[in-house]
Every structure is written in C-alpha cells, then in structure tokens.
Amino acid sequence: MTELYVGREDEFEDRGRKVIAHGDLEIGVFFVDGGFYAYENKCVHQGGPVCQGRILNRVVEMIADDKTSQGLAWSEDEVHIVCPWHGYEFNLKTGVHPGYKNARLRPFDVKVKDGEVYVVT
Amino acid sequence: MDSGVEQTRELPQEIDTKTNTRDILARETRYQKEKGFNDWTIVDVDAHHSEMSSWREVVEYLDDPILKHYANEFQARTGGAPGLSNHMPGLRYQDAGGRIPHQTHIGEAVDDSVHHRDVTLIRRSMDAMGLDHQILFPGNLLQLGTHPQPRVEAQLALAYNRWVCERILPVDERVKTLLYLPISEPDMCMKMIKEFGDNPNVSGFMITSVRFKPVHHNQFIPIYRELEERGLPLAFHAGLTWGDDWMKQLDLFISMHAISFVLCNIVHMTNWIIHGMQERFPKLDVIWIESGLAWLAFLMQRLDSEYLMRPSEAPLLKKLPSEYMADMYYTCQPIETSNMALTEETFKAVNAETQLLYASDWPHWDFNPPSTIYDLPFLDEKAKRNILGENAVRLFDIDTKKPKTA
C-alpha cells in the first residue's frame, strides 16, 4: 500500500479537483459535496483522460404523472465527470456510467490527515 | 509529511479547446509504447481538417468570378465562414454541448509562419497516434452533396480540391487524400480526374454519401470506368443529414447521427450491389468510409435473402450480395464494441483481415485511436497489423520506407 501526496485540503473548492501522476499512473481527485473521490485517469471506453474532462450535473428528463415529457433539466444532486475524448459520463461519487453499470472508473481510497490529502494505491 | 508517502506531479486539471493535440492524445502515445506497437506501420484512412477555418483561402481558388464575389461578400456577414456552402447549423451539436472539446474547436497555439496551420495540426495528431500515413478529408464540405445548386457544389469542390492539393498536401508526403467528386455534375468529375488523377498526393477519389442520387445511374458510369482504367480507388464517405424525411423524425442529434451515417451507405451499397457494379467494374477498388461496421452483417444477410428469392431483378449477379460485399474495403470507425461477439462475427463476414482499414476520424467526437484495433480480443497480431496498416499499404501502394516522423 502506497500513499500518494495530492495536496492540501484547503486547496480544494467544491467541485474542485487535482489530477496527479506517479510514474505512469494518473489519478483524478475530486471534492464534491464535502467528500473526496479519486479515480484512475483512464476511461473504460478507449483509455481517454477522463478525469481531465468537464464536470457537469447529470441531465435528467422530467416525466409528469401522465407520462408526458416535460423537457430536460440539470439534476440537483448528481454530478458527472465527462471524458473529453468521446463524452462517456460517470457519476463522480460512484464512478459509474448512468446507463451501463459495467462501465465504471477504477476507484482509489482518499485519506485526509492533518489537512493533507493522499490517495492510497 | 509521513515517511513512506510518495510525491506526485500535477497534470492540467482540464482539457479544453486550447489544449495541444499532443497532450489530448498523450495517453494513446504512451499506451502504444507500453504495448510495443508504436513501431508498427499504421495508416489512417479517414481523418479530417477544418477547411472552413481556411475558407477565405479556399474561395480564392474559385474559377467563377461571380461566385467568388458572392463568397467574398459572405465573409463580411455575421456568422462568417460558410458563405456559399450549405452547412446546417443544427449539426453543431456534434460536441455534445461542449463536452468534447476537440470537436468544438481546435484552438491550440500554432506557429503558422512556415507551414499552414492545418499541416502542423495534422502532424501533431499523426505523431501522437503513431501514424505513418494518413488520408485527409474535409469537414463541412462532406455535406455538399445536398447543395441545392449542383453547379455551386461542383465549383466549390473544384476550388477545395485545388486548394488542398496546392496548400496542404505537398508539405508532408505522409499525407494523401481521396479527392471530392461532385457527381451531380459528371462532366466536372471527369475534368477533376484528368486534372488530379496523376497527382502523387491523390490516392483516389471520393463520393460523399449524403446525397440523393442513385449511384448506379448511367450518367455516372464514365466516372467509374475512368477510375478503374487508371487504377484509382473510389470511396463512399458517409455523413449526417437532418434534411431527409426519415431523419426529420429523429429530433435528437444522437438518433439522427446513429442512423444517418449508416442509412446513406446502406442505400448506395444496395444500388451498387444489386445493379451489378462489382461485375461491371471488377478491378475498381471500392471503399466504404465512416459508417462503422455493425451495418454490414445486417445488409449482407438482408440482401442475400432477397436476392435468392428474386434473382430476376438482379440479373448481373453471379454470386451472393454478401460475397460482393466481402470483396470491397471498409474503414473501421466508429467501431461498435458493446457486444464483442457480434463485432467478431462482423469481422469474419467482411474478411476483415484483408478488407478492413483502420481509420481515426480525428478530430471528430467519435474518433478511434489505433489502440481500439490493437485491443480487440479476437484478433491475432497478423490481423491487427493488416487492419492497422498493411491492408492500406497494399491498397494504396504506399511506400513504407519513409520515416514515421516528418
């Protein structure tokens, strides 16, 4: 077990991130809703640098009680990371694609000690 | 800090439209070295540049003084570049709302004091993806086949062809093209084949598939005959349109794109096969570009089934439609792999080991780096090498002794 140094906790704003490299291993560390989440910077699709993509809320479609569509909206609580190569999207708290549970990013544990953030590999 | 903690280096947080192409594709560069196929011969049979970014240069190559006047007048108007072209604004959804920045805009810094900006961008992508050779196509001009003014289509095609042959292709001998044929104007096509057919940077010619002309019509036969006699391949490059009645029912880009890129080549392929074009032009090499691969197994079975019941309607055929289809060439992009068993069967059906050609489609949003072929679990090394490069080397008679980096 190795701990990789990421940075100071107070460097992260909400929805902030750092993408770090240790040798050939690249990891994105995200701070979302008060929690840290870390994933390998490698998309399960074709290996793209997924952690360096845009952070956007999930798009949801509003369906009324009568099953009619009322249009699209941003989710209020689900935040996605979007792979910049092809657009694969993953929930930042789970690392899972919204429609294909087998497509999931490789997660890493994150530790915060004395205000310093580390990724455990 | 605790002992035993490893230090790290920080990477850019986000890739955007200003990011250097080599950085966007850095993972592919490293992966090829890691897996050891970075020294294989890799030929990219379908990549694009943005001719609209150079539109002021392109329209200067127009012969017609009145069209040139219109083109220059359009430049001064809000919205800019596409004056005279029939580019549909709705197709700007390609980047998924800015989620895929290399599709949005290639805005990286380039010193264009020596070479055209496009040449530098092409070289960066080729080097990053380990490409030895590349077949380059335009972008928005692939829509030109539906231009309401056939003469304007032909004149723009001629201007683009002259511009790309003079300004872009001569700089790097690794980069070739299959030149645009405006088949709405067959006489212009013949003129183009004669003007450019011997150009060493022209590996063949291309018909854009987004058009509503039956490709077997007698008016096009001289074009195919001329290409066959010259030994020049003919490609059908698929594209997207929201302009036909079927596509108008698909009100999301994802739906239109998924079907449009395939439907156009299904229609042209059906005419090509059923009207016996492979019997009439047995030595003409035909390439079907950018429809993915999943459509092929469907169409092979569909046409075989119908042909066996109705041979009197396709009297030129001497074998099954699927057998003719397996004689032609296909680019692999955008490859469908969500069901790998179906992908494997499709590879078998089209004789992929000899007929499939790697294509990146860079810089478009659904591009495939070479690793997509390398990583396929059902191919042996010989098949991978053939698809990534050797099939194209044989088809286009490419000199592989040239260096990988310009």
Image: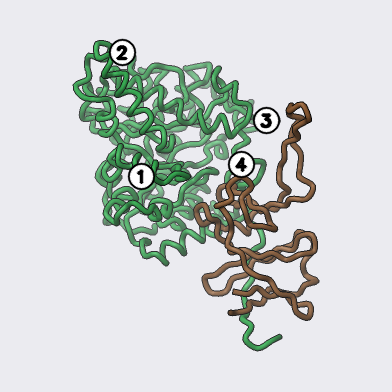
Chain colours: A brown, B green
In this rendering, the label closer to the viewer, 3 or 2: 2
**Disc 3 or 2, which lies upstream in sequence?**
3
The residue identified by callout 4 is B95
Secondary element at tag 4:
helix
Between residues A20 and A113, which one lies in front from this camera angle? A113
The residue identified by callout 3 is B76
Between residues B283 and B322, which one lies in front from this camera angle? B322
Secondary element at tag 1:
helix
Amino acid residing under circle 1: Glu
Distance, label 1 to label 2, CA atoms, is 37 Å
> Relative to B247, is B305 on the left or the right?
left
* Residue B283 sits above or below residue A60 on the image: above
**Disc 4 or 1, which lies upstream in sequence?**
4
Q: What residue is at 56 percent from the left and 21 percent from the top?
A: B243
Residue B218 shows which numbered tag?
2
Where residue A95 appears, as percent x and y from the top left, is: 63, 57
**Disc 4 or 2, which lies upstream in sequence?**
4
The residue identified by callout 1 is B344
Distance, label 4 to label 2, CA atoms, is 40 Å
In this rendering, the label closer to the viewer, 4 or 1: 1
